[in-house]
Amino acid sequence: MSKMDEEYVERQLSWNRQVVQHALDDPVFRTELLSDPKRALERKLGTLVPNAVEVRVLRQNARQLYVVLPHIPSDDEGEGEVDVEQLGSVTGGITETRGSWTIPLEDETNPF
C-alpha cells in the first residue's frame, strides 16, 4: 500500500472512530444514525453527503461481529477513466457543479 493510501485509510479509520464515539456518547445522535444515517452524518459534518455515497450503519449484538475493510484508492487503479475522487486528489478538492457541495480532501474530519 502506498503512503498516500495509508494516509487515506488512517483518515477513514480516525473519522469512523469519532462517529462511533459520538454515537456512544449521544443517544439522540445514535438513534438518528440508526434511522437515517445519511442525514445524521450530514448534520454532524455540516455538509451534504454526495448522492453517489450510500451510508449504512449496522448495530452489533452479542452474536454478531462486523469487520469493515476501508476503501483503498489504489484498488481502483486500472478500472478505466479517472473518477471524481481521483481527480480531486490531483486538484486538491472536489466541487460538484450540478449540486451544492464542495469538500476539500485535506479536511481530516470529512471522509468524503
Image: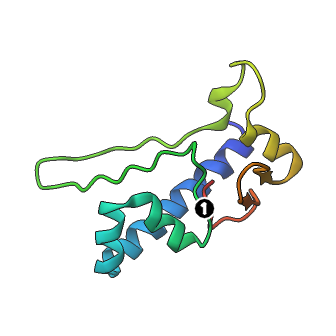
Give 34 or 77, whichever is nearer the viewer: 34
Which residue is drawn at the image coordinates 34% and 44% (left, top)? 67
**Residue 91: % across, % down:** 88, 48
The residue that label 1 is drawn on is 48
Report x, y in % for residue 6. Answer: 65, 46
- The image's colour scheme reads rainbow
Percent x, y for residue 5? 67, 42
Quick one: which residue is furthest to the right in this view? 91
Residue at 80 percent across and 46 percent down: it is: 88
Q: Is residue 77 left or right of residue 97?
A: left
**Residue 17 seen in the figure:** no
Q: Indicate the position of residue 97 as horizontal and vertical percent values.
A: 79, 50
- Tag 1: amino acid: Leu
Q: Quadrant of residue 79?
A: top right
In this view, the residue in front, 2 or 67, is 67
Describe the element under mark 1 as helix, strand or loop.
loop
Please identify the quadrant where the N terminus is shown. Answer: top right
Residue 57: quadrant of the picture: bottom left
Is 107 left or right of 28, judged from the image as shown? right
Q: Residue at x 86, y 43 (%)?
A: 90
* Residue 110 in sight: yes
Badge 1, how many Cα within 10 Å: few under 14, some, many 20+? some
Looking at the image, residue 88 sits to the left or right of residue 55; the answer is right
